[in-house]
Every structure is written in structure tokens, then in C-alpha cells.
């Protein structure tokens, strides 16, 4: 097993903690005033800066994790808000000064150009974007965006004599009884409707704040600003538009075939939104585990069988209690893997309720966790802070690679085949949804003065371009217009979504290699992840044995590959 790491500090005191700004201020003052008279002293100074930033990042991380695990605990919320409102605003201008001190050093040219290229590119970008007047605005954005979790975390419904989170209620969409599915759908939509106004107002506030940030930094709109902030050096908005069009051309038709087949097998005249998740053979929902503990144990076994190192990563997290997997009232929705740069052991958060989608979430976040372990020994934080196009490649590839060991979750081969078919169908559907959400965000920020009604109209038009056209929303039109409210990225991390699409294409290519030569593909996968962010994205993909490509030809080939694999499962 990977030894549970002990945090070793060379610059900070061993008992360092952040209870007030006075804990941090002397450190920043020392780093800013310290003389640097050689390249050796420069590298030592850089390591001290990064050690400080890692400790600060981990302190913030635990506040965020604890709050999302219990959004109704006011002490945890206040702890998080204290950091966002009192600590981060004071750090931001000092971090900018530290960046400028680094770039201005006469010894910078003596650093290894290849080793530090990506890091220094990121630092220079941060300097160019920094504006003093945006510090307060960024704090407001961080605080307000967390209201999304507070609002949605309270959403529960009562059904079958129980109070259920929306994730727990979602189990009923797998129920063969169509009347049950419709009842639950209507109950969920009614509950979501109660927060429609609050979420619209929240988004309008965020949209206004983000637009101001972009304008302060000299950008025409927030989209263009965010592309720079996200460090998108290896592609641009035109590549995103190309991706949208290719998905419409190659994956939307596959999505339509899936829904047509499901509608036919279910024997339905009208295929409704509550019919999209039930097994077309009217089988009971797949039940790969009963409780979070079982999910974790089976996931460790699955990872261990795939690659011993993968299993050791999850076992280490289990030993350190770096997981919160079950769904409960008051817990924020969704799932994530939070990298903790100082300890090197990440934290997995999710809302498991016993469904196959929970298995996918677990192995997805487990892929992120493996990535974190493979990069934990880098001393420069930016080497570990990989771009999402690479981070999601790690997680989405793990979903597909691990499929070969899903028999850990399913004793019955028919259930195993069902799970695999669901996974491939989900990828096709997800690519369409990703393209839809990304296309919508471009339109939102290109037209920030839209009214709520205009935003709804824009969403409906965009959604219709990427959905299969088979689902009948008659009488449910109002549910369609606010469908984007369920996508937390739009509220909390704008424009962080197209990465999933690019990475999904990459993951399909990794899986294709894995089916041909498992040993070689796994080694390439680990080699690529081990690079962290020390080389540009195209080179990382190359190390994984694949391409960073959005061309019509490439996407056409991958759509053909996944459909062939799906047909083999259907005929198996």
C-alpha cells in the first residue's frame, strides 16, 4: 500500500494554521522582501512560495469540503465564507506581487527553460490578468456561487412515505412501473419550480459580476476573459464551435437511434422524459451495491484488478478517511475529487444511492484521485494543477478502462452487459449534452443583457439542436426551459465543461488502445498522468498514445468506434 504521507514543511512552522490574516501576513512579507542573489536562491525562494501556497490551498480545501458535506451547518459555512471574504482578498494582490518578483528576477533566464516553460507561462498570464479592482468582485463571485449548493442542497421531496434528496428520488426513474416514474418526475419538477426564481436571480447576479471582472481586465466579454484565465493556450473558441458542429453531425444521430430503439422496445406511442432511464426490457434497476461502504470496497477491488497502484490509491484514501460517498439531506449535490496539494492525498465527495451511475461517478473521481497521487511529489503547485482537458482525460479514461472489471459489481453477466451498454449510451448522450451546455454558455456571455425570458428562449433553441428529437415534452415545456438550472457548472465554474467533451474523445481513444494492448495502454496512461502539467496539452495526449484533435475526421472515427462497440454488446 502507498504509505500515508506525512506533511513535511521546510519553510512553514510544523503547526502552521490559518485562524486570521495575522498568521499569513508575515510569511508574505518575508517572501516579498527576501533578497534573491543567485539562481539557487531563486529556486529555493520558489519552493518556499509554493509550500506556502500549498498550505493555504489545503486550508481552503478543507473548509470547502466540510461545508459541502453539510451545507446546513452554519459554523462550516461561516468558516468557508471567512476564508473567501477575509483571507483570499488579501492574498490576491500579494500573489500578484510575488509573481512579478519572479518574472523580474535577473536569474530567471538561468532556470531550466523546458522544465519551467508551462509554469512561467501560467505566471505571466496571471500577471496580465490581475486587476486590483477585481479582487473584491472575485470574492463576491466565490461567495455568491456557493449559494447554488445551498439552494439545491435543500431540495428534497416526499414519496412513498419517505423524504428523499433529488438524487435518491432519481432511483425511481429506473422503476418499470411507468405511473411511478411519472409521479416522481412531476414531484421533482414541482420542487425545482419552487427555486426557479431564486436560481434565476442568483445567475443574474453572477452574470453581472463576471461581466464587470472581464471589462475591468479589458475584455469584450466574460467568455474571452475566462478562456485566458483557464489558460486555454492550446485551443480557442473556434475549436469549441467546431466541436459543437461535429457532435451535431456525428453523435446527435446516434443519440436519436438510441431513443428510437428504446421507444420501440418499451412499446410507447409517446416517449416522455420519465422514460429515458428505465431499462427498455422493463428489468429492475441495476443494483451494484447497497451502501457507500460496499461501493468503496468493490471500487478498491475493481481498481486493484485493473492495476495494483490504482487500488492502493483508493485504499490509502480509505485509511485516511478522505471520502464522503453517501447521499443525505443537507449535503451539496454532485460529486468531485478535491486535490489537496500539501498532503498529496485527495478527497472524494459524491452522493451515492445504489445505482450504476454511482459506480461510474466513483471510478471517474477515482481516476482523478490516481492522477493526484501520480503528481503529488512535484514541489511546484502548477505542475500538479493540471488543465481540465487532462484531468478529465484521467477520469473518463478510468471509466472505460475499469469496465473490464465491473464483474466485481455484477455477478450476473446479463447485468454486467446492461451496465456496459448504459455506459456507452451515456457517453453518446453526454457528448451531446456537453456540446449543448457549452454552446449555451457562449451565447449567455456574448449577450449578457438578455432578460430571463430571452435566456430561456436561447436555451430551448440550443437544447433542441442537440437533443434526439424523440422525447415528447408536451405539457412539460416549462421544465425544458429551466433545464440548465440543473447544471452546476453554469453557476459555480462557468466554461469549465467543454473540457469533458474534449477529454471524452481522448478517453475513447485511450480505451480503443486498451482493447488492443492493455499493458501498453495502461503504461501510457500512467506516463501521461505522471507528467502533471509540465508540458503542453498536445504533448500530454501524445504521451497517452492519443491525439488532441477536434477535427471532423477524428470525431467521425471515434463515433464509429463507440457505435461498433455498442452494437457488439447489443448482439452479445
Image (cartoon, rainbow, N blue to C red):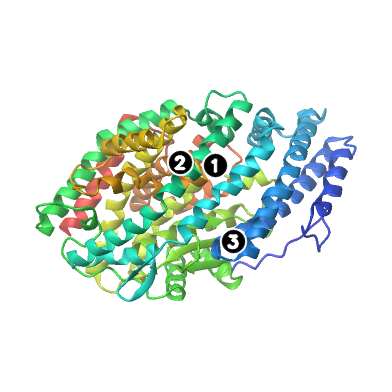
- Mark 2–mark 1 Cα distance, whole angstroms, equals 9 Å
Residue 569 occupies which quadrant of the picture?
Answer: bottom left
Left or right side of 492 for 469: left
Q: Earlier in the sequence, mark 2 or mark 1?
A: 1
Is residue 507 visible to the viewer in this orientation of the structure?
yes
Q: Residue at x 76, y 28 (%)?
A: 109
Q: In which quarter of the image is the C terminus?
A: bottom left
Q: Where is residue 38 in the image (x, y as percent from the top left)?
A: 87, 35
Residue contact at pointers 2 and 3, CB within 8 angstroms: no
Q: In which quarter of the image is the N terminus?
A: bottom right
Q: In which quarter of the image is residue 294?
A: bottom left
Residue wearing tag 1? 387
- Whether tag 2 and tag 1 are in contact, CB under 8 A, the answer is yes
What residue is drawn where x is 69% and y is 57%?
59
| Residue occupied by mark 2 | 499
Q: In this view, does 421 lie above or below 412?
A: above
x and y percentages locating residue 438 in the rendered image: 40, 37
User: Residue 44: horizontal and vertical position, in percent?
Assistant: 82, 44
For mark 2, does the 10 Å Cα neighbourhood hold few (<14), some (14 to 19), or many (20 or more) residues? some
Q: Is mark 3 on a helix, strand or loop?
A: helix
* Mark linked to residue 67: 3
Regarding mark 1 in the picture, which secondary structure is present there? loop
Amino acid at each position: 500500500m502507498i504509505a500515508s504521507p506525512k506533511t513535511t514543511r521546510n519553510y512553514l512552522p510544523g503547526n502552521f494554521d490559518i485562524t486570521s490574516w495575522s498568521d499569513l501576513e508575515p510569511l508574505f512579507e518575508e517572501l516579498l522582501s527576501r533578497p534573491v542573489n543567485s539562481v539557487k536562491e531563486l529556486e529555493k525562494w520558489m519552493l518556499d512560495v509554493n509550500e506556502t501556497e500549498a498550505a493555504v490551498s489545503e486550508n481552503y480545501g478543507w473548509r470547502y469540503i466540510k461545508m459541502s458535506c453539510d451545507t446546513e451547518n452554519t459554523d462550516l459555512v461561516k468558516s468557508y465564507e471567512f476564508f473567501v471574504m477575509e483571507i483570499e482578498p488579501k492574498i490576491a494582490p500579494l500573489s500578484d506581487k510575488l509573481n512579478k518578483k519572479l518574472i523580474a528576477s535577473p536569474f530567471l533566464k538561468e532556470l531550466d527553460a523546458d522544465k519551467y516553460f508551462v509554469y512561467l507561462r501560467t505566471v505571466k498570464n496571471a500577471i496580465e490578468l490581475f486587476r486590483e479592482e477585481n479582487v473584491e468582485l472575485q470574492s463576491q463571485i466565490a461567495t455568491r456561487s456557493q449559494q447554488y449548493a445551498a439552494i439545491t442542497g435543500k431540495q428534497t421531496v416526499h414519496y412513498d412515505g419517505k423524504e428523499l434528496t433529488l438524487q435518491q428520488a432519481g432511483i425511481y426513474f429506473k422503476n418499470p412501473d411507468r405511473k411511478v416514474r411519472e409521479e416522481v418526475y412531476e414531484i421533482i419538477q414541482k420542487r425545482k419550480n419552487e427555486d426557479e426564481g431564486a436560481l434565476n436571480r442568483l445567475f443574474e447576479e453572477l452574470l453581472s459580476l463576471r461581466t464587470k471582472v472581464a471589462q475591468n481586465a479589458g475584455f469584450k466579454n466574460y467568455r474571452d476573459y475566462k478562456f485566458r484565465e483557464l489558460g486555454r493556450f492550446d485551443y480557442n473558441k473556434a475549436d469549441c464551435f467546431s466541436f459543437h458542429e461535429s457532435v451535431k453531425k456525428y453523435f446527435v444521430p446516434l443519440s436519436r437511434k438510441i431513443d428510437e430503439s428504446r421507444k420501440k422496445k418499451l412499446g410507447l406511442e409517446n416517449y416522455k422524459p420519465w422514460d429515458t432511464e428505465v431499462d427498455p426490457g422493463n428489468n429492475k434497476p441495476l443494483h451494484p451495491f447497497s451502501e457507500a461502504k460496499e461501493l468503496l470496497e468493490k471500487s478498491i477491488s475493481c481498481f486493484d484488478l485493473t492495476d495494483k497502484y490504482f487500488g492502493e490509491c483508493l485504499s490509502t484514501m480509505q485509511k485516511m478517511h478522505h471520502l464522503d460517498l453517501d447521499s443525505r439531506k443537507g449535503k451539496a449535490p454532485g460529486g468531485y475529487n478535491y486535490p489537496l496539494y500539501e498532503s498529496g492525498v485527495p478527497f472524494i465527495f459524491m452522493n451515492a444511492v445504489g445505482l450504476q451511475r454511482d459506480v461510474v461517478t466513483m471510478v471517474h473521481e477515482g481516476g482523478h484521485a490516481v492522477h493526484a497521487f501520480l503528481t503529488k511529489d512535484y514541489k511546484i503547485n502548477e505542475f500538479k494543477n493540471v488543465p481540465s482537458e487532462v484531468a478529465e482525460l484521467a477520469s473518463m479514461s478510468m471509466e472505460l478502462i475499469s469496465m473490464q472489471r465491473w464483474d466485481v459489481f455484477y455477478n450476473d453477466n446479463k447485468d454486467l452487459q446492461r451496465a456496459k451498454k448504459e455506459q456507452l449510451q451515456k457517453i453518446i448522450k453526454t457528448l451531446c449534452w456537453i456540446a449543448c451546455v457549452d454552446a449555451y454558455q457562449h451565447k449567455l456571455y456574448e449577450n449578457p443583457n438578455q432578460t430571463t425570458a430571452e435566456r430561456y428562449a436561447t436555451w430551448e433553441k440550443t437544447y433542441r439542436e442537440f437533443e434526439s428529437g424523440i422525447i415528447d415534452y408536451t405539457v412539460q415545456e416549462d421544465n425544458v426551459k429551466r433545464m440548465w438550472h440543473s447544471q452546476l457548472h453554469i453557476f459555480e465554474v462557468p466554461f469549465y465543461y467543454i473540457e469533458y467533451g474534449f477529454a471524452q474523445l481522448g478517453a475513447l481513444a485511450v480505451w480503443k488502445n486498451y482493447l488492443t494492448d492493455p499493458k501498453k495502454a495502461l503504461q501510457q496512461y500512467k506516463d501521461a498522468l505522471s507528467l502533471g502539467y509540465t508540458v503542453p496539452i498536445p504533448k500530454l495526449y501524445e504521451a497517452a498514445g492519443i491525439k488532441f484533435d477536434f477535427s471532423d475526421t477524428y470525431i467521425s472515427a471515434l463515433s464509429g468506434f463507440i457505435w461498433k462497440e455498442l452494437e457488439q454488446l447489443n448482439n452479445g
